[in-house]
Image: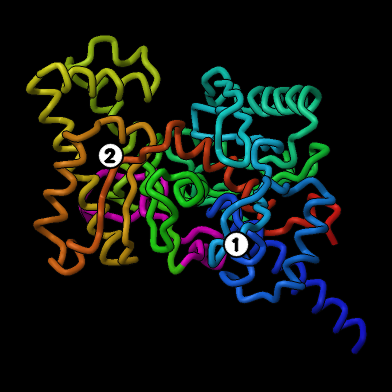
Amino acid sequence: MSGVSHASQASISESNRSRILHYLYHEGVSSRAQIAKALGLTPAAITKITARLIEADVIQETGSIEGSKNRRSIGIALDSKRFHVIGVKFARSLVSVGVFDLDGNRVSLEQLPPVKESTIHRTLDSIRSTIEELLAHDDTIMAIGMAVPGPYLRSTGRTAVVSSMQGWRTINLREEFLHAFAVPVFIEQDARAGVLAQYLFDPAGPCDNLAYYLLGEGVGLGVIDGGHVINGAQGTATEIGHVSIDVHGRPCDCGNVGCLERYCSAVAIHEALCSGDLVPAAETMTHAQACAALFREACDGNGRAASMVKAIGEYVGYGCVTIINSFNPERIVIGDIVAQGGDLLLRAAQDVVDERVIPELRSATSITISALPTDAAICGAASVAITQILNHPSTFFDVA
């Protein structure tokens, strides 16, 4: 019984440390009394825990601040700038590696050469060497987060379907990276990583009922419901890219037909541009470059381009309808390559939602383009690592 009691007490202590760090992360400089009141902990418990966090240089005292009843208190804050994480974004043909502080501020960002089926293993080597170099030159890096295309089978470490580049399916990411470096590595599905980034870094503040709608080389969805990320039994929940919007539609690599991903992903848009003359030399461009060229044409007044962007936006809207009816989020945030279609794409999506969603649900749901300064998936990769640090501080610091 004593062993169980000790383990239980250690778990409670870790939970309280995590709650304090989360509070300071979102609220900024606070007094011990404010934290105790907000979290329902005793002043003695707060004093003990914060003393250990200060000793470990995780938090710091900031000087005198105004407390309750005009009394002066000593403020404390999380030293977010002092610690760094690495974020790695996998997006079929694109891989980015960035360093961020705990507030999500970008320290550095490197885009690796475009990936082809024949160069996947070379890319894995490049990722390893890039990370090793970053670790060698920055001893404040605490962890590595990786955002990978879904559906990502978390228990086995493999992505089940990677449309347009099936070679990634043969790669076991857990075996490749989980124990490859001197700091811990955490791997998450890209849209789920994206919703963590929106939760942590969105200028509008955290939202406990949030959907991040990823429109990149694939289409994905990450959902936070009641403050908790929806995962599913194998980590593949909310895989909206493979929801069929046309039972007689285009075939998809997943085996289904009419998947949303076949109509409004960057890959699908690029395929359409290569079969026409709207964007000259589209076939020589990357998926992101082709989409950017289309959006520029639309912005410059090209009617055909504008019509195509509106049509893409309608498909995006069909996805929003499914998101609202399935998960009832307070906010839907659209991000990644196709989100660069901007207001034209957003208005078309909103028009579809206005027409097809119950008014009470529609009025309670905002739909916006991501306001994050850096691509949410690479920020999301970083946020996967940051979330682990906030949730499990004793794994990273001597605070027990």
- Which residue is drawn at the image coordinates 72% and 63% (left, top)? 17
- Which residue is drawn at the image coordinates 60% and 56% (left, top)? 30
How packed mark 2 is, by other alpha carbons closer than 10 Å (few <14, some 14-19, many 20 or more), is many
Q: Secondary structure at mark 1?
A: loop
> Given contact means CB atoms under 8 Å apart, are the residues at marks 2 and 1 in contact?
no
Q: Quadrant of the N terminus?
A: bottom right
Judge whether residue 239 is colored magenta: yes
Q: Is residue 135 above or below residue 202?
A: above
- Depth check: give the residue in front, 40 or 192: 40
According to the image, label 2 marks what residue? 264
The quarter holding residue 182 reads: top right
- Depth check: give the residue in front, 330 or 302: 330
Distance in Å between CA atoms under marks 2 and 1: 57 Å
Horizontal relation, residue 156 to residue 224: left or right? right
Q: Is residue 59 above or below residue 304?
A: below
Q: Is residue 156 visible?
A: no
Judge whether residue 165 is colored magenta: no
- Going from N to C along the chain, the mark reached first, 2 or 1, is 1
- Depth check: give the residue in front, 63 or 26: 63
The quarter holding residue 274 reads: top left
Horizontal relation, residue 227 to residue 209: left or right? right
Q: Is residue 150 above or below residue 12?
A: above
Tell me residue 185's x, y (percent).
71, 44
Residue type (three-letter) at the residue carrying disc 1: Arg
- Which residue is drawn at the image coordinates 21% and 52% (left, top)? 318
Tell me residue 173's x, y (percent).
66, 43
Q: Secondary structure at mark 2?
A: helix
According to the image, label 1 marks what residue? 71
Horizontal relation, residue 260 to residue 173: left or right? left
Q: Where are the magenta residues, as a range?
A: 227-255
Horizontal relation, residue 392 to residue 164: left or right? right
